[in-house]
């Protein structure tokens, strides 16, 4: 009996702390930021990965662009030593329900928010690959933002992440 009461007490206590935590988080949450830990300020890139590709073929890089600043920022340019041509593409539904892709006009990371590039959505298109990209390889790329941030990083090549 004592055991049961103790158990009940613990469960009640856990429930109360869970509810109060959820309440606090709810108040701090804005837009899509709850999924990501934003930097204190400026732009950071997280979770970058690239698809495998053949020489002269194409690949894509996906990532989360995290904007910790209080102003929105836009992508100015992107380049990679493995590709002759790099563009940011958006996926869209063509007539007859076919999916197509085209260069994205504005790629914006909202103030205190995140922009996700993922399969079936926005992606960095690597074209004219000058080497094969195999699972386990890595791809270097550089991104420049309108507010002046320049980031160079390496994305692992993976066959499928999400
Ligand atoms: Cu594309």
Image: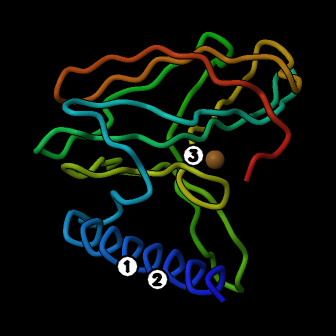
Q: CA distance from mark 1 to mark 2?
A: 6 Å
Q: Is residue 78 above or below residue 116?
A: above
Q: Secondary structure at mark 2?
A: helix
Quarter of the image where the C terminus is located: bottom right
Disc 2 target residue: 12
Label 1 close to label 2 by CB (< 8 Å) = yes
Q: Residue at x 44, y 31 (%)?
A: 45
Between 144 and 1, the one nearer to me in the picture:
1
Residue 124 point in image, percent of width and height: 56, 38
Residue farthest to the left, as pictured: 70
Q: Quadrant of the N terminus?
A: bottom right
Q: Position of residue 113 (x, y in %)?
A: 28, 52
Residue 126, image x and y in percent?
65, 30
Distance Cα–Cα, label 1 vs label 3: 42 Å
In the image, 42 versus 102, the foreground residue is: 42
CA distance separating discs 2 and 3: 46 Å
Which residue is at 83% across, 32% downward?
A: 52
Mark 3, ligand 1, within 8 Å: the answer is: yes
Position of 93 compared to 160: left or right?
left
Tell me, for residue 16, which label it has, or none. 1
Q: Position of residue 37 (x, y in %)?
A: 37, 44
Q: Nearer the viewer, mark 1 or mark 2?
A: 2
Q: Which mark is residue 123?
A: 3
Task: Say whether residue 46 is left or right of residue 154.
Answer: left
């Amino acid at each position: 009996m004592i055991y049961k009461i103790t158990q009940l007490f613990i469960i009640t206590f856990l429930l109360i702390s869970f509810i109060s935590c959820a309440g606090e988080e709810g108040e701090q949450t804005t837009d899509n930021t709850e999924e990501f830990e934003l930097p204190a300020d400026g732009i950071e890139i997280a979770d970058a990965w690239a698809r495998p590709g053949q020489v002269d073929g194409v690949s894509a890089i996906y990532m989360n662009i995290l904007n910790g600043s209080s102003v929105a920022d836009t992508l100015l340019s992107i380049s990679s030593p493995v590709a002759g041509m790099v563009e940011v593409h958006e996926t869209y539904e063509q007539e007859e329900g076919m999916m197509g892709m085209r260069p994205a006009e504005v790629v914006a990371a909202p103030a205190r928010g995140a922009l996700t590039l993922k399969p079936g959505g926005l992606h960095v298109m690597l074209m004219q690959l000058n080497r094969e990209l195999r699972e386990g390889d890595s791809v270097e790329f550089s991104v420049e933002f309108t507010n002046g941030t320049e980031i160079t990083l390496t994305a692992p090549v993976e066959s499928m992440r999400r």
